[in-house]
Image (tube, helix red, strand yellow):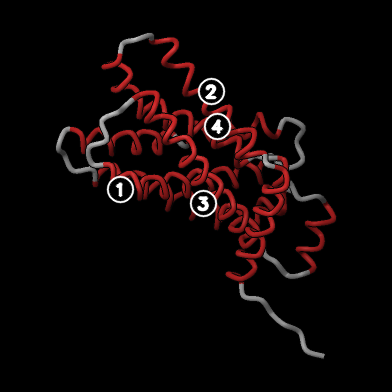
Amino acid sequence: MTTTVVAPLGQCLTLAAKDLRLERRAGEAMLVTAPFGAVALLLAPLAVGTDTPLLRQLGPALYWLVVLLFGVLVTMRASAVDGPAQLAMLRLAGVSPRVRLAGRALANGVLLLGFQLVLAPVAVLLYDPDLTGWPWLLPVFVLVAAGLAVLGALADALAVGLAGRTTLGPLLVAPIAVPLLLGATGVLQATGYGRSPWPWLLLVTTVDLVAALLAAWCARYLEDLA
């Protein structure tokens, strides 16, 4: 009898695919959270009024603020919760805590990237922002999704089993994710003024790397706490 050993990367991809299948069936991110995010983008123009120059100036910052706040809810979705039986099965299968956290973060990143792409046309339609240097937004979308996905997976691991999980998660992630908000907003502002956006991209990349290293370091400790 032979036993097939799956590499950690394969395990990570399998776990991420499992989370994405569950999300596709539940529809929490795209069918519930995304419409609420679009409504949040709609409320700001109603509050500001017809001051079009002000809306164009505030548009990018408001877009990334909504992505940050509602994106945390995407990472804390109920379909991502593994019960005791699922966790026991993964442990018996030899899946390490780091791999499980990486799989959750990968699934979060895919959903957050889709969430951003769904909200982006709504923000452009409502705020008509200056999109000078818009190609720089492509790496920003990926980097923000990656950083927020890892932070959300960490917060989810910390709050596992708690009754106020979906409330505690945003409180944990939002303060740490402020550099992501500043960096993403700064990229578009820098290109609009003809300056280099590299310092802002470096800020977002640094946050991503620190979050990834933190997740790799404390994954096993979070497993023991759980």
Q: Nearer the viewer, residue 76 or 33?
A: 33
Q: How far is the residue under mark 1 from the one under mark 3?
A: 18 Å
N-term mark: 1 or 3:
1
Q: Residue furthest front?
A: 125
Q: Which residue is mark 2?
A: 39
Residue at left offset 18%, top offset 43%: 196
Relative to 221, does residue 158 appear above or below in the rendering? Answer: above
N-term mark: 2 or 1:
2
Q: How many residues crowd mark 3 within 10 Å: few (<14), some (14–19), many (20+)? A: some
Q: Secondary structure at mark 2?
A: helix
Q: Nearer the viewer, residue 26 or 88?
A: 26
Q: How many residues crowd mark 2 within 10 Å: few (<14), some (14–19), many (20+)? A: few
N-term mark: 2 or 4:
2
Q: Which residue is mark 3?
A: 214
Q: Secondary structure at mark 4?
A: helix
In the rendered structure, find residue 70 and report the number of the disc placed on it: 4
In the rendered structure, find residue 202 and report the number of the disc placed on it: 1
CB under 8 Å between callouts 1 and 3?
A: no
CB under 8 Å between callouts 2 and 4?
A: no
| Residue type pointed to by label 4 | Phe
Residue at left offset 54%, top offset 51%: 110
Relative to 36, does residue 223 appear above or below in the rendering? Answer: below
Q: How far is the residue under mark 4 from the one under mark 3?
A: 23 Å
Q: How far is the residue under mark 2 from the one under mark 1?
A: 31 Å
| Residue type pointed to by label 2 | Val
Q: How far is the residue under mark 2 from the one under mark 4?
A: 11 Å
N-term mark: 2 or 3:
2
> Residue 184, how many percent across, how many down?
35, 38
| Residue type pointed to by label 1 | Leu
